Image: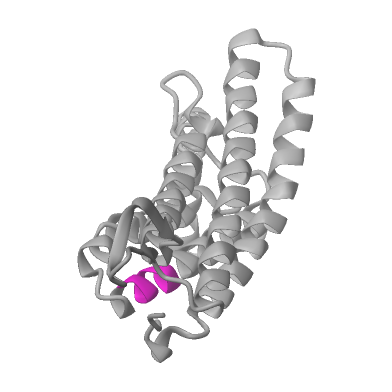
C-alpha cells in the first residue's frame, strides 16, 4: 500500500472544519433573504431575491457533498488505500476489475466543487441592471466569516494538492481564492451609521457594497441649498 506525504497530515481536517464554519454561517443569510422575499410585493424584485435564496441553498448543497468527499479522502488515506489493484495469476496488477479508492482524484474533485461554491456565491450577489442595490449581504458579518473560511478551506486543499505533486490542479484554484476576497469586500460592507463620522475608506466600501447609496447621496446633494 502506498502512503501519502506526512506533511499534509492535518490539512484536510482543517479544511473540513473551515467548511463546517461556512455551512453554519450561511444559514443566517439564507434566512434573511427568504424573509425579505416574503415581504416584497414587486414581482421582478421578488424574483431577484428568490434567485439569491436558491443560490445560497445550492451553495449549501455543494458544501455538503464536498465535506463528504474530504472525509472520503481522509478515510482512504487513513486506511492506506490508494488505487489498489487486483492481482493476476503472476502477482501483477490486474486492471479489468478497476482499483480500490483514488484519494488524489477525489481530492481534485473536492477542489473543483469548492470553486463551484465560490462561483455560486458570486452569482448570488451579481448586480442586476434594474436592482443593483440587492447585490449585498443581508448578514455581512456572517457572510464575511463564511467567505473567509471558504477561502481558507480552498487554500488548504490546494496545499494538499501540492503535497501530492498536483501543482497544476492547485493552480486552477488560484482565481477562486482571489475572487473570494474581492467578493467579501464588495458585498459584506455595512452602511455607515448616521453620526458615526465614517472615514473616506468606509464610505467608499459602503458605496461598493451598495451603489444605490451613491445615487441617493447625489440626489440629496442636488436638492440642498447652495
Q: Is residue 33 left or right of residue 221?
A: right
Residue 136 visible in this rendered orientation of the protein: yes
Q: Residue furthest front?
A: 89
Q: Is residue 22 left or right of residue 219?
A: right
Residue 156, image quadrant: bottom left
Q: Quick check: 210 above or below 200?
A: above
Q: Give 7 or 134, whichever is nearer the viewer.
A: 7
Q: Give 62 or 87, whichever is nearer the viewer.
A: 87
Q: Position of residue 117 (x, y in %)?
A: 49, 47
Residue 216 visible in this rendered orientation of the protein: no
Q: Quick check: 152 above or below 115?
A: below
In magenta, the rendered stretch is 155-161
Q: Position of residue 70 (x, y in %)?
A: 54, 63
Residue drawn at (48%, 39%) of the image: 120
Q: Residue furthest bottom?
A: 6
Q: Position of residue 2 (x, y in %)?
A: 38, 80
Residue 36, image quadrant: top right
In the image, residue 154 lies in the stretch drawn in magenta? no
Residue drawn at (43%, 63%) of the image: 201
Magenta-colored segment: predominant secondary structure:
helix
Amino acid at each position: 500500500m502506498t502512503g501519502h506525504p506526512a506533511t499534509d497530515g492535518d490539512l484536510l481536517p482543517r479544511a473540513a472544519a473551515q467548511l463546517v464554519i461556512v455551512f453554519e454561517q450561511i444559514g443566517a443569510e439564507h434566512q434573511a433573504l427568504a424573509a425579505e422575499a416574503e415581504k416584497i410585493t414587486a414581482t421582478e424584485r421578488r424574483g431577484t431575491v428568490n434567485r439569491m435564496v436558491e443560490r445560497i441553498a445550492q451553495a449549501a448543497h455543494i458544501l455538503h457533498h464536498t465535506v463528504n468527499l474530504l472525509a472520503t479522502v481522509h478515510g482512504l488515506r487513513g486506511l492506506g488505500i490508494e488505487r489498489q489493484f487486483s492481482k493476476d495469476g503472476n502477482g501483477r496488477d490486474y486492471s479489468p476489475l478497476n482499483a480500490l479508492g483514488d484519494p488524489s482524484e477525489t481530492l481534485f474533485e473536492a477542489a473543483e466543487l469548492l470553486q463551484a461554491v465560490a462561483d455560486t456565491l458570486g452569482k448570488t450577489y451579481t448586480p442586476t441592471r434594474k436592482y443593483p442595490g440587492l447585490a449585498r449581504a443581508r448578514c455581512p458579518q456572517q457572510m464575511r466569516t463564511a467567505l473567509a473560511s471558504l477561502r481558507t478551506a480552498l487554500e488548504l486543499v490546494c496545499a494538499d494538492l501540492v503535497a501530492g505533486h498536483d501543482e497544476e490542479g492547485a493552480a486552477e484554484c488560484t482565481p477562486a481564492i482571489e475572487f473570494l476576497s474581492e467578493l467579501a469586500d464588495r458585498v459584506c460592507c455595512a452602511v455607515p451609521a448616521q453620526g458615526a463620522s465614517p472615514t473616506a475608506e468606509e464610505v467608499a466600501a459602503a458605496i461598493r457594497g451598495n451603489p444605490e447609496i451613491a445615487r441617493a447621496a447625489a440626489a440629496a446633494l442636488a436638492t440642498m441649498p447652495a
